[in-house]
Image: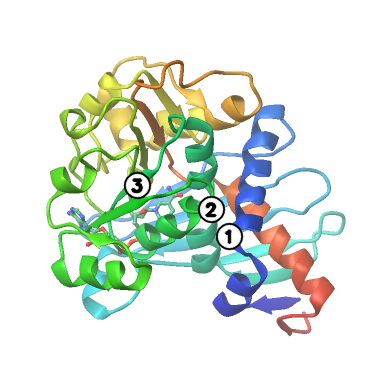
Amino acid sequence: MRLLTATDVHALLDPDAAIATQRAAFTALATGDAWQPDKIGGGPGGVDSTVFCYAARLGAATGPVSKFGSVNPGNAALGLPSIHAVLVALHPETGVPVAVLDGGAVTTVRTSAASAVAVAALARPGASRLAVLGAGTQGRAHVRAISRVLAVKDVAIWSPIPEERESAARELDVRAVADVADAVAGADVVVCATLATEPILTPDLLRPGATVVSIGSFEEHRREIGTDLLAASAAVVVDHVPTARAHSGPVVAARRPMELLALGDVLTGRATARRDPDDLVTYLSVGLGVQDAAAAWHVVERAEALDIGQEIAW
Ligand SMILES: NC(=O)c1ccc[n+]([C@@H]2O[C@H](COP(=O)([O-])OP(=O)(O)OC[C@H]3O[C@@H](n4cnc5c(N)ncnc54)[C@H](O)[C@@H]3O)[C@@H](O)[C@H]2O)c1
């Protein structure tokens, strides 16, 4: 069995390859080739953290993958990332464990790459202005990933913490903006990647034709965007319809039947999201095991080919 650290994962999964893995994951969901059961998530009362556990399989050629981890919002005060996870990949034919990966690194790369896939499919023609709300691990990764699919001319990054947005702006060579309304003014694509439980963005702040991506509305009680934004959208696209109906904060909060389009259906031409350049289109990501499976198997296969990672007798 191979042990693959965060350094190994980042070395083996470059942004363009990661984007290709996510396109493959959503396509496999649309064609019915993937196995994507519901996730397990939650925790006891009285704790601030959320445990998550995913199992999935991309298809017959690659083995099952499981990711077990925790989101701990209090970690920022300790100087630690909010998300930690362990990912295990099993052999497709024998089920023998073939690799254990740093699941935090896989999560960072696959989530931002998946948003890039969504942006490429959903953004208005000529989109070039990006605003990112949230300047943590995901906010920063999203600037990098979306820059691979959009000819970005301007990037504004916002966080409620001045030092955080300033350090992100320095690291990424983008604009730090102190106010959400100023950050999103005129933006073609707005990414929400925060730990906010209440909406931080309202539709009146957006230009016509904007595409909003929210990755932080991943649990029933998390709504970094609100039901007003869904109601104002010409199309609401999600990573997986059953998962979004069960777990996406704004969808659950809407408490009424709402048309949701699956990203995989948009990618494969089974559904059309944007019909007009001035449509507001929203993409909600809860996060799926099949995304981890697609990214992890790319890493495992390259690690085997290049003999990277520590081998452990099992
Ligand atoms: N959908 C997915 O697949 C997926 C995958 C990974 C992470 N996520 C989610 O993305 C979000 C960001 O994750 P991360 O790893 O970048 O976390 P992080 O801790 O590195 O960054 C969180 C950001 O949110 C900001 N923030 C915290 N509380 C806030 C509040 N009340 N209002 C506004 N902003 C606030 C922080 O200042 C920081 O900029 C989290 O909600 C996480 O659970 C989703």
> Can residue 97 be seen in the rendering of this structure?
no
Considering depth in this image, is 96 or 9 the residue closer to the camera? 9
Q: What kind of colouring is applied to the model shown? A: rainbow
Marks 2/1: CA distance? 8 Å
Which corner quadrant of the image does residue 36 belong to? top right
Whether tag 2 and tag 1 are in contact, CB under 8 A, the answer is yes
Quarter of the image where ligand 1 sits: bottom left
- Work out which quarter of the rendered image holds the N terminus and state it: bottom right
Query: Relative to the observer, which residue lies in front, 172 or 158?
Result: 172
Residue at coordinates 33% horizontally, 25% vertically from top-left?
280
Q: Name the one closer to the observer, 307 or 65.
A: 307
Indicate the amino acid at tag 1. Answer: Pro
Which sits earlier in the primary sequence, circle 2 or circle 3?
Answer: 3
Is 216 situated left or right of 244 in this image? left
Residue 52: percent from left, percent from top: 45, 55
> Looking at this view, is 263 or 80 the one in front?
263
Q: Which residue sits at x=67%, y=70%?
A: 12
Q: Secondary structure at mark 3?
A: strand
Could you say which quadrant of the image residue 164 lies in?
bottom left
- Any mark on residue 209, and which? none
Q: Amino acid at mark 3?
A: Leu
Relative to residue 241, is residue 161 depicted above or below?
below
Using the image, tell me which numbered label, if any, was put on residue 148. Answer: 2
Residue type, numbered disc 2: Arg
Rendered view: 166 above or below 195: below
User: What secondary structure is marked by label 1?
Assistant: helix
Q: Which residue is mark 3?
A: 130
| Residue designated by label 1 | 15
Helix, strand or loop status at disc 2: loop
